[in-house]
Amino acid sequence: MTHWSVRHADVFDADADGLICSANPNLNLSGGVGGALLLRYGEEMQTHLHGYLTKNHRKFVEPGTVVVTPSCGSPFAAIAHAVAIDAFYDTNADIIYRTYKFAIAQLTAVKCRNIAAACLGCGYGRCSVDEFIKSVAALIAIPIKDVDTFTFVTTNADLVDSISETIAANVAT
């Protein structure tokens, strides 16, 4: 059974082998967690992401797309770059939920059992806290095979409180 939690912290301090980070449709590591990845670990990850676009003859990807990269020097075994927004940064609970599910499937396929996740659609994305919480409630309601821990990590204290309340209300201990 998956242990769900939330931390008010820097996502790079999470004790996990897999990371779900928010990505934009152009797969540019230009802001938020992606920008921090680029600054901390260099160009290798950006090169990998742009290579994905080139290989697939794309200039951008659709919401719900997840591209997994190797560590590229980060503390994580694999990173799932999850696109839960459109080109105008719009999103909703259903898109976020489906994107998390796909990212989890991609990370478990490469044997990640402990996952840290940024709050998709909540940074530059235009997702309200209430809409995001709908996706969290739906996600924690389903059994997730092969995931021991799943930790939402954010620097938004209000979001931490809302996620914590949702976990407490929806997960049997």
Image (cartoon, rainbow, N blue to C red):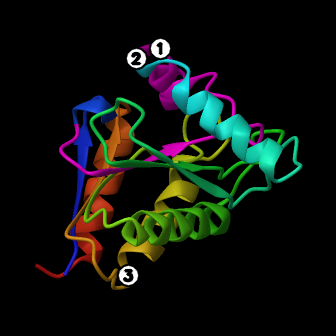
Reading the image, the residue beneath label 1 is 39
Q: Report whether 6 appears left or right of 22.
A: left
- Between 142 and 23, the one nearer to me in the picture: 23
Q: Residue at x 42, y 33 (%)?
A: 72
Mark number, residue 40? 2
Task: Point out residue 115 in the picture as x, y percentages from the top left corner.
Answer: 30, 56
Q: From mark 3 to mark 1, how far is it between C-alphas?
A: 36 Å
Q: What segment carries the magenta color?
A: 14-40
For numbered disc 2, what is the local secondary structure?
helix
Task: Point out residue 61 in the picture as x, y percentages from the top left corner.
Answer: 79, 51
Q: Amino acid at mark 1?
A: Leu
Residue 14, compared with residue 146, is above or below; it is above
Q: Report whether 59 appears left or right of 138.
A: right
Residue 16 colored in magenta in the image: yes
- Between 78 and 96, the one nearer to me in the picture: 78
For numbered disc 1, what is the local secondary structure?
helix
Residue 24 colored in magenta in the image: yes
Reading the image, the residue beneath label 3 is 141
Say which label, 3 or 1, has the lower sequence index.
1
Q: From mark 2 to mark 3, how far is it between C-alphas?
A: 35 Å
Q: Residue at x 62, y 41 (%)?
A: 23
